[in-house]
Amino acid sequence: MKSIESATLFLQSCFDEKGLPEGYTEKNLLDLYSLSADPSFAANLFKIATTIRDLNLGSSPWWSAGISAITPCEIEPSCTYCTFFTRSAAEIEDIVAAAQAIASLGIRHLHLSGGSRLATEGAAFSGYDSQMIDLVSAIKDAVDMEIEVNVGPSLTRKGVRALQKLGVVAVTSSLEVFNSNLFERYKPGDSLSGRIRLMEICEEEGMPIRSMILVGLGESDEDRIAHLIFLRRFSMLRHLRFSRFIPFPNATAGGVRCSPWPVARLIAVARLLLPTIDLGLAAGNSPDDLPLWWLAGGGNQVLGASVSMRVPQGKGTGEGHVITVNERVAVHNKMQQITRYLDELGLTPIFLK
Ligand code: SF4
């Protein structure tokens, strides 16, 4: 039976940069997670999580940026909570122009994300291997930036190797929800096994991995903790981002927006399990979530600018300053707003060199 006393004792045993002590159990983590629903207990968990974050990653957030909808999504039927995919391909020149505009802000870290085309292993390139190789080559020719790639389970081993040669710093494979029934219900055209396989390929090839968890789709506490424990087996995992479920207008999934509280608590438990991993915020969160994220041991990457290749010029997404690149591309610069939010936490964001 869980008790505050035994959970507190366990929590105290995590109090160094290594996070969890040897011999921890899934039940230890489940107890911590469920007890942290009480804010007074969560305060203890957050304190230890932030200490582990500071010991391993320091206390300086650093700027990153994203360009989304770079590839059409060919998943049919589409995921029932998703309305942010595109069915048309973006021009390489426009994506390069967006990357140059982001670089002009001083940002040196870029993640490229798009829809999926399921890949099959074989002699030839498959999925989006060739498109990503061409795109990364073009961006690398134009700007000096670290590039991460996220096109779902659309890359083969050959594609991963080619991207590694081009200097890609991470490939994303997001399991989203670690419950195969829920995955099939909400992502009926997608492949959980394909996503796990891509993580395994990256692990075997020495390619850093970035992954995402979607919180609030209907998964249990057990599913959330099992998801974190599963990810811990990947020694190449470098980034884990947490999405907060939001029922986008016109999405058939319906439902109610997830509170930031279970997300923050899960980040804190993730910090114990994954002490050196960058834990970030993804879709469904906003800059308003930054204080709780930081307080819970999140860090250290912050998204300063974004471009969606499906949003017409002048109509960036969310708050911030819109920089028009051309008639088809606009960069949404949130650095000013985020700098103010971080400053009010006593933090100063830095640029990668
Ligand atoms: S695979 Fe990604 S982009 Fe495509 S429908 Fe699903 S969530 Fe949307």
Image (spheres, helix red, strand yellow):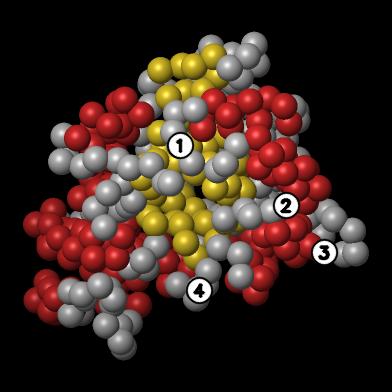
Residue receiving disc 1: 107
Q: Earlier in the sequence, mark 3 or mark 4?
A: 3
Q: Measuring 34% from the left and 51% from the top, which residue is drawn there?
A: 300
Cα distance between the residues tagged 3 and 4:
23 Å
- Labels 2, 4: front one: 4
Q: Quadrant of residue 206?
A: bottom right
Residue receiving disc 4: 235
Res. 308 visible in picture: no
Indicate if the residue with disc 1 has its beta carbon within 8 Å of ligand 1.
no
Side of 311 relative to 121 (left or right): left
Q: Quadrant of the N terminus?
A: bottom left
Q: Is residue 23 above or below residue 290?
A: below
Of 275 and 267, the residue lying toward us = 275
From the top left corner, tell me how far across and down residue 148 is, in percent: 57, 49
- Labels 3, 4: front one: 4
Secondary structure of the residue carrying tag 4 is loop
Q: Earlier in the sequence, mark 4 or mark 1?
A: 1
Q: Are marks 2 and 4 in contact (CB under 8 Å)?
A: no
Outermost residue, bottom direction?
23
Mark carried by residue 79? none
Q: Is residue 94 above or below residue 181?
A: above
Q: Earlier in the sequence, mark 2 or mark 4?
A: 2
From the top left corner, tell me how far across and down residue 44 is, in percent: 12, 63
Of 108 and 67, the residue lying toward us = 108
Residue receiving disc 3: 121
Cα distance between the residues tagged 2 and 4:
22 Å
Q: Earlier in the sequence, mark 3 or mark 1?
A: 1
Cα distance between the residues tagged 3 and 1:
35 Å
